[in-house]
Every structure is written in structure tokens, then in C-alpha cells.
Amino acid sequence: GDQVMGNSFSGSYLYDREEIAERTGKIEEKAEEILRGMPDGSDDYEKVKYIYEYLVAHTEYVRGCVDNQNICSVFLNGESVCQGYAKAAQYLFGKSGIASIFVSGKVGDGEDHVWNLVRINGAYYHVDITWGDASYVSGAESGFDGKLPQINYEYLCVPDSQLARTHTIDNIVPVPVCDSMEANYYVR
């Protein structure tokens, strides 16, 4: 009926302990390499911008790529879909001391999509690295056509009002209101 009487969950692993340990080590190495490239003395905005730019420049949007629903696709293979971009960003934000949230919703005609929400100087902003990547916008299957800039900054630190033009948030878990423009890329 309409009443939940119980819920159970069980997981399964794709890889054995040795493979998990090896992949974890490679991910840690890659994350440290990425973060070593961050300019010294970066404030929170500059950290978010660096991670955004790095992931756009070093990840290709490829439907059906290996491990596309997790960070392995980004850190180990350099290709992913929105789930991989957002999870990799979440991981790097956390290692950089940036408070962030993984957000799920819909875009276009109801296609599932995920992105991040970050806190900078006490205000929250949406960050959609997938939509910031020209390989996604131009259609990775056909190859980048060179007509768009490699990095689209329209989705770097945007408020709800701007994001709502193209994205709808799933309201399963409420997310903080994003109403500041202070750290918006075009304002900065």
C-alpha cells in the first residue's frame, strides 16, 4: 500500500580486495597529483574553479565508458558521464576543504543528471562540471568540433535562478538555497 513497512539493502562488489586496494592507491596518487597543481594560497573560489577547469580539461564525456558511474572513470581513464564528473569533483572538493553536496535532478526533457553544490564564504552555489565541458555539449560521440570554447563557465558557481533555466532538482533531500552571485564566475 502507501505505507513502508521495511527496507533492506545489500551491496555487491565488482572487484576483489586486491583490485580495490590497487585502484584506491591509483586514485589517491592521481588526486594528489591534481591538487599539487592548485596555486598556493588559493581561496575557496579559486579551488573550486581550479577543480572545475582541471576536470573539464582532462575528462572526455563518453557514454558507456568503463566505470562511468564512479570516480575510477575520471581518475583512471579520463572519460566519464555526469555521475563520474560529479563524484570526482566531490572527492577533490573534500580533499581541498570545500564543503560540497552531490545533487541529483533532471535536465532537458527529463533526462536524469547530477552535479555539485559548493559552499564558498558561507554562500552556496551550483557547479555543473559536465555542462561546463564542451565534449559533452558538442556530443563526445561525434568528437569535439572546435566551435565551442573547451571550458564553458556558465555552470561555475551559479544561483538557483540561473540553474533553474536548464536543470530541475529532485526534492528527495532538500538542498541549501543558492541565491548569491558573489562567487559567480562572471561576477568574479
Image (spheres, rainbow, N blue to C red):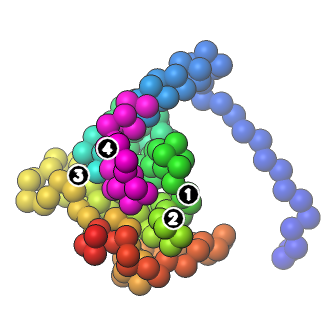
The amino acid at mark 3 is: Ser
Question: For this view, does 43 lie left or right of residue 14?
Answer: left
Residue depicted at x 25% and y 45%: 57
Q: Residue at x 37, y 30 (%)?
A: 33
Comparing 50 with 155, the one in front is 50
Q: Report the residue marked by disc 1.
A: 99
Q: Secondary structure at mark 2?
A: strand
Mark 3 or 1, which is nearer the eye?
1
Q: Secondary structure at mark 4?
A: loop
Q: Would you call the spot at circle 2 few (<14 residues within 10 Å), some (14-19), or many (20 or more)?
A: many
Crowding around mark 3 (Cα neighbors within 10 Å: few <14, some 14 to 19, many 20+) is many
As for residue 34 lying within the magenta part, the answer is yes
Which stretch appears magenta?
32-50
Within the magenta stretch, is there residue 63? no
Q: Between marks 4 and 1, how big is the CA–CA gap?
A: 19 Å
**Of helix, strand and loop, which one carries label 1?**
loop
In the displayed structure, would residue 34 be above or below residue 19?
A: below
**Where's the N terminus, which quadrant?**
bottom right
Amino acid type, residue under disc 4 in the picture: Pro
Q: Indicate the amino acid at tag 2.
A: Arg
**Do tag 1 and tag 2 residues touch (Cβ < 8 Å)?**
yes
Alpha-carbon neighbours of circle 4 within 10 Å: few (<14), some, or many (≥20)?
few
| Residue tagged 4 | 39
Left or right of residue 94, residue 180 in this image: left
Mark 4 or mark 3, whichever is nearer to me: 4
| First in sequence: mark 2 vs mark 4 | 4
Left or right: 134 as drawn, with respect to 182? left
Q: Label 3: state its secondary structure.
A: helix
Observer-side mark, 2 or 4, equals 4
Q: Going from the N terminus, do you reach mark 4 or mark 1 first? A: 4
